[in-house]
Structure formats: structure tokens, C-alpha cells
Amino acid sequence: MSDLAPYAASEAQSRGRRIAEPTPKYRGEYQRDRDRIIHSTAFRRLIYKTQVFVNHEGDLYRTRLTHSLEVSQVGRSVATALALNEPLTEAICLAHDLGHTPFGHAGQDELNDCMREFGGFEHNLQSLRVVDELEAKYADFPGLNLMFETREGILKHCSKANARQLGDVGRRFLDREQPGLEAQIANIADAIAYNNHDVDDGLRAGLLTLEQLQAQPLFAAGYDDVQRLHPGLDDRRLIYETIRRMIGRVVTDLIENTRANIETLEPGSIDDVRKAGKTLVAFSDEIYEQHVSLKRFLQQHLYSHEKKLEMTRRAQSIVRELFDLYSADVSLLPEEFAGRAKDKDEAGRARVVADYVAGMTDRYAIAEHERLLC
Ligand code: MG
């Protein structure tokens, strides 16, 4: 790791773990974080959690697990190109959705609504809760006891009220500071991954068409190149060749524009990055516009597609009904959760129920819902 840039996150400058542990012998501290995330229960559950399409809708769609792996692939490429901390970037990317509810954003929004009077529910904050408190594997501490920089990266956004309760890791939202560059990369890698894989999944599902997508500059640029170089290519390969060009274009732009931002600001350390007043990991204006345009297009034509909305309504009622059932009778919860809820006030009980429902996979939520209501 000796070739890290001076403004990269490093073990030497780290704010460390909440509970001190002996240094690992054959791997770095951030590699240990990544390994703990991979071995966590929440990580394994991501395979049965919806990204856009519910797991049982088809075997080829992204799940939250494969999404997280694609985020990590993009993030690592960018981190390596900029001489930043690759294991840390990987750890943040793999962990970024650990707190996601079943049924994607429909589940998250409904659970947030259920928790409205009790502080709300935000999947980002929940990811931090998973690694700080909910994973119960280690004898010496709750959660995974990750490094500060990994936790900082997982907490992408946060309200001031929540930030005040979070201590060290919430501080930057009150001080208006930025996170380290590895966290900034993970944030954009998430958007790059879903923008691209949702085009692929949307086309595969027949909810988007090539004609519609050709009005998107990012898609059209790649599509025209492929048509020119490989006339008559079948649709499947044409789509893949187009998407790989789209990813290549935005990733290259991100690396080069970020490099230019770094050259302008000349940060000497991660603390200079934190105090920079703006994020340094950013697209050029032109690509940013195209990226946002594609994002809006997906919002309008894929995430709000009538077929998707059917699933959304069904998911919302499952989450709502499970939440209400467990809240009315916490003895329906598994022993460990029922025990945690026992001596709590209403808000405390609601949080335990939210933790339990948020941890469910899609299919488990469906099965539990059937078992309890039928
Ligand atoms: Mg994500």
C-alpha cells in the first residue's frame, strides 16, 4: 500500500475502530473490514432482496447482492486509477446496501412511513446500524467493529437530528465536511452501477425499448459506435456492447475529472479532502448532465412503470401489515428480537420491529406474511 496518494485514507491516519483490536497479521485493516462484511449475515441476505425486480420475477435480474458486487467493481477501478485505498473502497461498496429493506425502495418508503412517529427509517442509516449494532457474531463487541473510514463511507447522508445522536461518524454532517475520497467514489459508483444495470434489466424485462433509449445521449453514443463497428449484431450483444461502452465512458470521465479536481485543490491529506467544501470525486459537467438525464429517464419509464407499481403496492401492504402485526404483539417476533423489545417504550419497540422487518429477504417477508395472515 506504499503507493497510496497522500490524500488517500490510510491506516496510519485512520481514526481507527470503536473498540481497539490487535492489528491483523497478514492483511490490512480495511481488508479485514471487507472480509467481515462478506462474512456477515446481512450480506448473504442481499441475494434475496430486490434491486428493481423482485427476486422471483426472473433469475437473470440484478439482486441487491449482484448490484453491490457491480458497485464494488466500478469503485475499485476508480480507486486504483487514482492511487486511493482500494480495500476501503471495496468494503464501503459491499456494505452500502446492507440496511436495505425487502422489496427495494417500495419497502424502504413504507417502513419509513410506519416509523414516522418514531424517528423514521432510512436504509443508509440502517446499513450503519447493521455494522455497528445488529450483526451479532463476535464475542468482544456488537456489530462488526469496522474502521471509522468504512463507517463514514457507509453513512452517505444523514439528517442533523440523527447526526447529533451518532457521535464521531455523524460529526461531518454538522460541520459540513466531506467524507474521504473512497467514500465519495462508493457513492458515485452506486449510481453508475444502477443506471447501467437497470437499462439492461429494463430492456430484458421488456419495460424499456431500444427506441426510447436512443434518445438518451449516453446510450446513443455507445449504441451508434457499436452499430458502426458491428453492423447486424444481434440485440443481446448489441445491448451488452452498448452498456460496456456507457460504463467505460462515465468511469473514464469520473477518473479524469476527479484527477483534475485533485490537481487544482492539491490536498495534502485526507483532512484537506474533508475540509475541501465540495466533493472532489465528480463527473465533468457534460457527463453529469447525461448521467442525470438517464437517471430521470429510468425514474420515469422503469421505476414508475405500471408493472413495477403493481409490485410496489403489493410490497407496501406486506411491509405495513407485518409491521402492524409485530407491533401489536411483539411475542410474534423471534426470541432474540422479542427479548430486545420487552422492556422498551413504544418507540423502542417500533425500532426493534423495524430492524426485524428491514432484515427480511423478499421471499421471507412474503412467507411470514402468509403464515401470519392466512
Ligand atoms: Mg445501492
Image: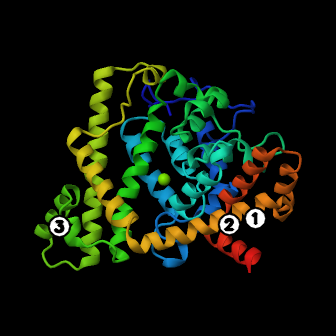
Q: Secondary structure at mark 3?
A: helix
Which percent across, then down, holds residue 66? 50, 63
Q: Viewer-proximal residue, 353 or 117?
A: 117
Disc 1 marks which residue? 325
Single out the mark in the foreground, 1 or 3.
Answer: 1
| Snapshot quadrant of residue 232 | bottom left
Q: Which disc number belongs to residue 175? A: none
Q: Which disc number belongs to residue 321? A: 2
Residue in the image at 38% along x and 43% along y? 78
Residue in the image at 30% along x and 28% along y? 261
Disc 3 marks which residue? 226
Which percent across, then down, holds residue 334? 83, 62
The three-letter code of the residue at mark 3 reads Val
Residue in the image at 28% along x and 56% along y? 294
Q: Earlier in the sequence, mark 1 or mark 3?
A: 3
Residues under numbered marks 1 and 3 in contact, where contact means CB atoms less than 8 Å apart: no
| Snapshot quadrant of residue 107 | bottom right
How many residues crowd around disc 1 within 10 Å: few (fewer than 14), some, or many (20 or more)? some
Q: Disc 3 to disc 2, how far (Cα)?
A: 48 Å
Residue 135 visible from this viewpoint:
no
Residues under numbered marks 1 and 2 in contact, where contact means CB atoms less than 8 Å apart: yes
